[in-house]
Image: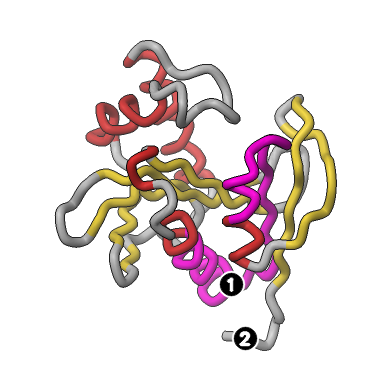
């Protein structure tokens, strides 16, 4: 199953391409956006490596990958949402990252619902994980609004995180 463009009421979710390097760099170089993730990406070369890794995930995992999020009306680059293998597990991880000017508008939840729908109804995968930095309360609230259950502390990507899981009923199609 090939990763496809998705739409919501306010957003377009478009599979990333090499052409998205500059926009991704603006997002990944923002120290406030990256506060709970890792060091900001200081050079375009570092972001190029990140983008190549994102594109490789999509290539290796049909139907999964990273979507750039844009507003439908103005086509503003909001950030990204992704589904990808969770470090050292069989789980699929939900991740998202938004420019701070779009925080608090419900865009993370809206984009996440769209990709979770693909995971559940098209790929027939009925479990998804998500992780956050223990201090990232805003992201934790988004996950709780999506219906994820807090599972406690875990170690992924060599750091301690808060782990969340959602399971969908197998009868919902």
Give the label on residue 172, or none. 2
Taking the image as shown, residue 50 lies to the left or right of residue 150, namely left
Q: Residue drawn at (27%, 35%), measured in percent from left and top?
A: 20
Instruction: Classify 10 Å Cα crowding around label 2: few (below 14), some (14-19), many (20 and above).
Output: few
Instruction: Classify 10 Å Cα crowding around label 1: few (below 14), some (14-19), many (20 and above).
Output: some
Numbered marks: total: 2
Q: Residue drawn at (83%, 53%), measured in percent from left and top?
A: 151
User: Does residue 40 belong to the magenta stretch?
Assistant: no
How far from the left and from the top, in percent, is residue 104?
A: 43, 52
Cα gap from disc 2 to disc 1, whole angstroms:
8 Å
Q: Which residues are magenta?
A: 112-141
Q: Quadrant of residue 47?
A: top left
Q: Are marks 2 and 1 in contact (CB under 8 Å)?
A: yes
How far from the left and from the top, in percent, is residue 126?
A: 68, 70
How far from the left and from the top, in percent, is residue 34?
A: 50, 27
Q: Residue drawn at (39%, 38%), measured in percent from left and top?
A: 100
Q: Residue drawn at (57%, 22%), measured in percent from left and top?
A: 38
Between 88 and 80, the one nearer to me in the picture: 80
Give the colour scheme shown. secondary structure
Residue 47 lies, with reference to residue 10, above or below; the image says above
Per the image, the residue denoted by label 1 is 120
Residue 13 lies, with reference to residue 126, above or below; the image says above
Give the label on residue 108, or none. none
The secondary structure type at the circle numbered 1 is helix
Quadrant housing the C terminus: bottom right
Taking the image as shown, residue 121 lies to the left or right of residue 165, namely left
Taking the image as shown, residue 94 lies to the left or right of residue 33, namely right
- Whichever of labels 2 and 1 marks the residue nearer the N terminus, that label is 1
User: Does residue 118 belong to the magenta stretch?
Assistant: yes
Taking the image as shown, residue 145 lies to the left or right of residue 62, namely right
How far from the left and from the top, in percent, is residue 16?
A: 34, 43
Residue 37 lies, with reference to residue 42, above or below; the image says below
């Amino acid at each position: 199953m090939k990763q496809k463009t998705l739409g919501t009421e306010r957003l377009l979710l478009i599979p990333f391409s090499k052409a998205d390097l500059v926009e991704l760099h603006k997002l990944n170089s923002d120290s406030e956006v990256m506060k709970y993730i890792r060091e900001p990406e200081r050079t375009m070369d570092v972001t190029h490596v990140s983008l190549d890794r994102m594109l490789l995930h999509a290539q290796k995992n049909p139907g999964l990958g990273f979507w750039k999020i844009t507003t439908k009306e103005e086509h503003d680059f909001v950030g990204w949402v992704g589904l990808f293998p969770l470090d050292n597990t069989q789980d699929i991880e939900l991740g998202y990252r938004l420019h701070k000017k779009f925080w608090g508008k419900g865009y993370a939840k809206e984009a996440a619902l769209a990709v979770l729908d693909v995971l559940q109804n098209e790929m027939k995968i009925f479990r998804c994980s998500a992780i956050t930095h223990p201090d990232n309360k805003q992201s934790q609230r988004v996950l709780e609004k999506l219906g994820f259950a807090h599972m406690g502390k875990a170690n992924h990507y060599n750091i301690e995180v808060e782990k969340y899981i959602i399971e969908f009923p197998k009868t919902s199609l």
